[in-house]
Amino acid sequence: MREAKKCIIVDDEPAAHYVLANYIKQNPQLELVFQGYNGIEAMNYLRENTVDLMFLDINMPEISGMELLKILPTHPKTILTTAYSEFALESYDYGVIDYLLKPIYFPRFLKAIDRFFATENGKQKAEEAINSVNVKVDGYLMNIELDQLLFAQSFGNYVKLHTTKRTYLASITTTEFEKCLPEKSFMRIHKSYIVALDKIEVTEKDFVIIKNERIPIGITYKRELTDRLKKFK
């Protein structure tokens, strides 16, 4: 059986929480880890925690669901929940995977969950196929085997790639390079560092050690790194 996916509910209506929480509890593939009643609560939680799926209401006071998606730099896979359908088209611009109209019936909820797991399975298969990346080094394209990559370090508009063989200075930004990597095996742990999770030898409060190199852990990444390492090991 696959590991349960962490999900949250963000809705200002207690009745909606009751319905969705009940549906989630009936699905062992899902784990409800947080219930928020406005966008501010959701933002604060997502800054400190990693979530797989968000059930998000559109019509909320102060910050609407659509505004929340626009504000968040990154957000979990999202299923919108609302009594109105006029935002359906716009919602797909933000990676929303489904749109549930209230009142939400259980069969329709299950269909949305099946769609979520279909996207997760596709992502996993795509990541499993990635075993190397091509980057420009000294004006030439070079193939870097990911099983040899220890960590990547920001260096202006370049990235230092520390591998088991040597260090390369690649003409690519850290953000661009991060998008080339499978999320399952690599993680940004600091604004300037991305590490291979299986290459971490020691983990301390403020740094990790890879091949005698002390790599700092940014404060905003600590909680996620702890969670990822628990699952990874």
Image (tube, grey):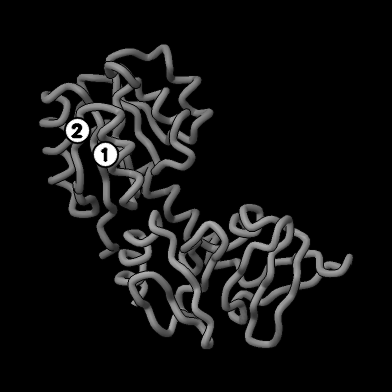
Residue closer to the observer: 27 or 151: 151
Q: Amino acid at mark 1?
A: Leu
Q: Which residue sits at x=58%, y=62%?
A: 181
Q: Mark 1 touching mark 2, by CB under 8 A? A: yes
In the image shown, does 186 or 193 lie closer to the viewer?
193
**Residue 166: x percent and y percent?**
71, 84
- Badge 1 crowding class, 10 Å Cα cut-off, few under 14, some 14 to 19, many 20 or more, is some
Q: Which residue is mark 1?
A: 110
The kind of secondary structure element at disc 1 is helix
Residue 129 at what x, y percent from top left? 58, 67
Q: Residue furthest right?
A: 139
Q: Amino acid at mark 2?
A: Phe
> Residue 65 at x, y = what percent?
36, 24
Q: Is residue 81 left or right of residue 77?
A: left
At 50% from the left and 21% from the top, the residue drawn is 90
Left or right of residue 92, residue 129 in this image:
right
Image point (43%, 20%), residue name: 88
Give the vertical position of 26 relative to 101 (above or below). below
Residue 126: where, in percent of width, then height? 55, 59
Tell me, for residue 149, which label it has, or none.
Answer: none
Figure check: 117 above or below 161: above
Question: How many other residues sit within 10 Å of disc 2, few (<14), some (14-19) or many (≥20)?
Answer: some
Q: Quadrant of residue 136?
A: bottom right
Q: What whole-number distance in Å separates the C-alpha atoms at marks 1 and 2?
A: 6 Å
Query: To which residue does mark 2 refer?
Result: 106
